[in-house]
Amino acid sequence: MAEKVIHPGRLPLLIVFVLCVVSVPVHSQDWKDELRAEQSRNAARIVEIDREGLALDAQLKQVKSEIIAHNERGCTYRKHHEKQDCGAWEEEGRSLGGQQEAILAKLNPLAKEYDRLIVRNLEIAQKLLEKR
């Protein structure tokens, strides 16, 4: 029986073929690992956003209660006096309103990021299930 000999010119082609066959499972797992890593990073960021959001929510509740108390107190000025006597009360109201706006300016982007990360993690989970 004659032995099969691989022609030297075809050796590089055979090596490339073997490498491709061997590397396909590795590459097919790479995208899953990348998605899982992204999912993990997203989950960690979601936890951070929760912490930040809870702190900002507590601040917002405090400011809102101060606004309610401020509005209930109202401005009292004596008869025969001008409304300018309410300047301090009005300034306090503007200050509280500004504090509320500043907190909301921080809270709203966090809420959007949170929602985006939740949706992305759901997309990743779906892709991982589909591509099993």
Image (cartoon, rainbow, N blue to C red):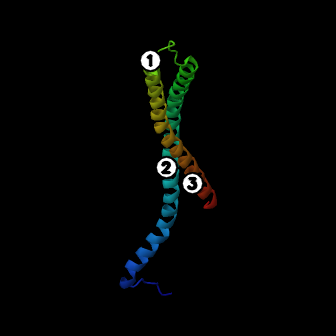
What mark, if any, has residue 85 been given in the picture? 1
Residue 127 location, quadrant = bottom right
22 up-or-down from 128: above or below: below
Return the residue found at the far top: 78
Horizontal and vertical percent for residue 48? Answer: 49, 36
N-terminal label among 3 and 2: 2
Residue 27 at x, y = what percent?
Answer: 48, 63
Under tag 2, what secondary structure? helix
Question: Of callouts 3 and 1, which one flags the residue occurring earlier in the amino acid sequence?
Answer: 1
- Amino acid type assigned to the residue bearing label 1 in the image: Asp
Task: State which mark lies toward you, 2 or 1.
Answer: 1
Residue at image position (49%, 49%) is 37
Q: Which mark is residue 124?
A: 3
Q: Amino acid at mark 2?
A: Ala
From the viewer's side, name the closer residue of 35 and 66. Answer: 66
x then y, percent, for residue 36? 52, 51
For discs 3 and 1, the disc positioned in front in the rendered view: 1
Q: Please name the residue shown 47% across and 66% down the image.
A: 23
Q: Mark 3 and mark 2: span between their CA atoms?
A: 10 Å
Would you say 16 lies left or right of 61 here? left
Q: Residue 92 location in percent, x, y?
A: 45, 22
Residue at mark 3 to residue at mark 1: CA–CA distance:
60 Å
Examine the image and state in which quarter residue 72 appears.
top right
Identify the secondary structure beneath mark 3.
Answer: helix
Q: Which residue is mark 2?
A: 37
Which amino acid type corresponds to the residue marked 3 in the rendered image? Answer: Ile
**Residue at 48% of width from left, 43% of height from top?**
109
What residue is rendered at 52% in x and 28% in y?
60
